[in-house]
């Protein structure tokens, strides 16, 4: 216990690293540390909440999920005290995708040219083409790491002399210390759909610990699920998250409570099942398979209309059990679980 404050100080320091893998790992470690030492952690709890909530809106999906998992661990320890902090964040962030501009971008305002996951910032007004197409000015190499204008021989020692050194993660070259919770070596405009994506993960964690607090957010989740893949460029990423997490949320809420919302989720679920994006379709198929197990196959099939049954019969992502034998299907669990992470 006497070492906990120093340990937490180090973890908070790493939580502000330039490298997203370092932030991802420290985010998870902070959650476990608070879970193990709740009283000793109170001194930095406000700062940790600020960091966790900010990283629910990170541009890396695994960081968003890790933040939600850490907040779930905090919720187990502090109960209603923690819930009262999370509910306003859920209420604000979950519907943000509804105002997402059509020209959404992924990893907006950052380039992935830095080693070990270090994200270099670019001007917010700049449009970032792929690195192979981008002019050198947009790649924003520091003066001492700009690529040579002339190719060097493979064994030229100048290639390996007085160059920046990197350890695991990216603690060198030394990161810049920012003043705000998201100003640690990179800047970018946030995308509304990413806030909704992180909120879906948080809702999953809340449902696992306090299921009675979940139902109030299902109308908002339903509105998000009704977004079409054509609504904005990366809508299929958000829908993939929704359909992957909905069965987990439903199971934690309880079959009886969730059945009240089932029929409202079916139209957008089956629309995604034939949207043309394989990952989104796979997630929708996974959701159907899991809901059938949770609710009961006969009850689930009884809620479908003829068109939905035909769509399900023709989908390769829906388990063939209980359906017409003339439809040959397979379900690739590896694809369907690509983004499940720690769920």
Image (cartoon, rainbow, N blue to C red):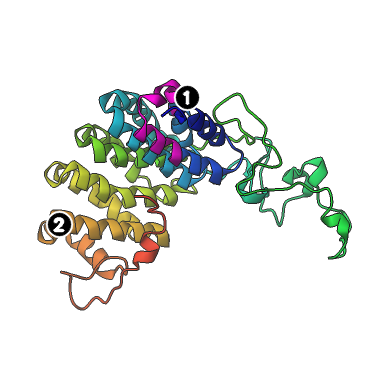
Residue 36 found in image quarter: top left
Q: Is residue 264 visible?
A: no
Say which element carries label 1.
helix
Q: Is residue 155 above or below residue 179?
A: below
At x 61%, y 24%, the residue is 179
At x 49%, y 44%, the residue is 25
- Residue 117 point in image, percent of width and height: 60, 48
Residue 316 found in image quarter: bottom left
Q: Which of 274 and 208 is in front in this view?
A: 208
Identify the magenta region.
Answer: 28-48
Q: Is residue 35 above or below residue 169?
A: above
Residue 47: image tag: 1
- Local crowd size for mark 1, using a 10 Å CA cut-off: few (<14), some (14–19), many (≥20): few
Which residue is label 2 attached to?
300
- Residue 183 point in image, percent of width and height: 60, 30
Q: In this view, does 184 lie to the left or right of 84?
A: right
């Amino acid at each position: 216990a006497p070492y906990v404050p120093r340990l937490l100080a180090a973890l908070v320091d790493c939580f502000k690293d330039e490298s997203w893998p370092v932030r991802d790992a420290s985010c998870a470690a902070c959650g476990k540390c608070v879970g193990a030492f709740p009283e000793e952690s109170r001194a930095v709890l406000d700062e940790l909440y600020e960091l966790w909530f900010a990283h629910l809106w990170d541009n890396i999906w695994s960081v968003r999920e890790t933040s939600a998992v850490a907040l779930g661990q905090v919720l187990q320890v502090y109960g209603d005290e923690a819930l009262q902090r999370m509910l306003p964040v859920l209420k604000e962030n979950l519907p943000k995708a509804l105002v997402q501009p059509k020209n959404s971008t992924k990893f907006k305002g950052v380039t992935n040219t830095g080693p070990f996951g270090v994200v270099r910032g670019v001007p917010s007004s700049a449009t970032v083409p792929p690195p192979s197409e981008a002019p050198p000015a947009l790649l924003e190499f520091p003066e001492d790491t700009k690529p040579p204008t002339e190719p060097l021989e493979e064994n030229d020692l100048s290639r390996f002399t007085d160059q920046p050194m990197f350890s695991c993660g990216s603690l060198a070259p030394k990161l810049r210390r920012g003043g705000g919770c998201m100003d640690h070596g990179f800047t970018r405009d946030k995308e509304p759909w990413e806030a909704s994506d992180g909120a879906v993960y948080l809702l999953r964690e809340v449902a696992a610990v306090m299921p009675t607090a979940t139902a109030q957010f299902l109308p908002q989740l339903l509105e998000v699920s009704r977004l079409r893949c054509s609504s904005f460029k990366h809508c299929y990423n958000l829908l993939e998250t929704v359909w992957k997490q909905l069965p987990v949320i439903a199971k934690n809420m309880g079959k009886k409570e969730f059945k009240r919302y089932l029929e409202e989720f079916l139209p957008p679920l089956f629309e995604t099942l034939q949207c043309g994006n394989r990952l989104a379709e796979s997630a929708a198929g996974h959701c159907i398979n899991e809901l059938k197990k949770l609710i009961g196959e006969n009850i689930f099939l009884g809620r479908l209309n003829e068109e939905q049954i035909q769509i399900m019969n023709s989908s390769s992502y829906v388990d063939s059990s209980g359906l017409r034998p003339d439809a040959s299907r397979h379900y690739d669990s590896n694809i369907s679980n690509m983004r499940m992470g720690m769920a």
